[in-house]
Each structure stands twice: as structure tokens, then as C-alpha cells.
Image: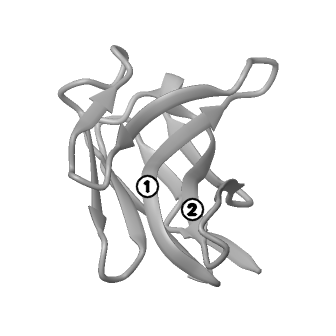
Amino acid sequence: QVQLVESGGGLVQAGGSLRVSCAASGRIFSINDMAWYRQAPGKQRELVASITRGLNTNYADSVKGRFTISRDNAKNTVYLQMNILKPEDTALYYCNAKIRQTDLLYYDYWGQGTQVTVSS
């Protein structure tokens, strides 16, 4: 009923930039918080950044000053601009959204993940 589709991952050299996007579609009444998580091999999934519908943001300490989360409420899309990338940023990046559907209940949705690989 609802899909989150990520795009924009890839391979980049250390110090470079990438932007990933996540678009929500389907039976959506509204979207509350949106966020990006990441999971590196052998590690737990961790929160990278989140943004409320009112555009308040929160970042993991490891990405503050380098990553910027933003959203376009009209397009049901969230973005993550990643600058000054480091090899330790290599991970599968997942989009998460708390979506209010037409039954007016909130549901938690995840994207399928997009790979970001930073070479040294």
C-alpha cells in the first residue's frame, strides 16, 4: 500500500559527495518524521539523521557538519546530502518514514536500502 523507494547511492572517493533520495508513494494521508539509517557489515543499524514535518532536524555526532537532511513535503520525499565522505561512512543506507494512512493510523515504513561505498 505504501512504498519507500531510495535512489542515489554509489561509489565515491573519500572527501567526495553524494546525495540520496527517498520517495514515498501509495495510500498516504500525511507523513510525520522521516529519517535515514545506515548499517555497515557486522554492525547494528544506526540513526544517521531525522527530520520532522516541521523541518526540525537531528544528526548523529559522527555526521554533524558533513551531512544535511531535508524534505519536500509536497513530493513526499526526503534527501540526505553527504559531503566530505569518509570510508567509515560506507554502509547500506535505509530510509524510514512514519506515515499516516487513510485510516488515520500511523505506520512505520522502511525502504529497501541503497549502498554507499567510500573508497580511501
Which sits earlier in the primary sequence, circle 1 or circle 2? 1
Given residues 17 and 14, the one toward you in this image is: 17
Q: Is residue 32 above or below residue 36?
A: below
Is residue 120 visible in the rendered image? The answer is: no
Whole-percent x, y for residue 70 in the image:
26, 56
Whole-percent x, y for residue 101 in the image:
62, 72
What number is the disc on residue 99? 2
**Colour mode of the rendering:** one colour
Q: Residues within 10 Å of mark 2 (few under 14, many from 20)?
A: many
Q: Secondary structure at mark 1?
A: strand
Q: Residues within 10 Å of mark 1 (few under 14, many from 20)?
A: some
Is residue 33 visible in the rendered image? The answer is: yes
Residue pictured at 36% horizontal, 60% vertical: 79
Given residues 12 and 114, the one toward you in this image is: 114
Q: Secondary structure at mark 2?
A: strand
Residue pictured at 57% horizontal, 62% vertical: 99
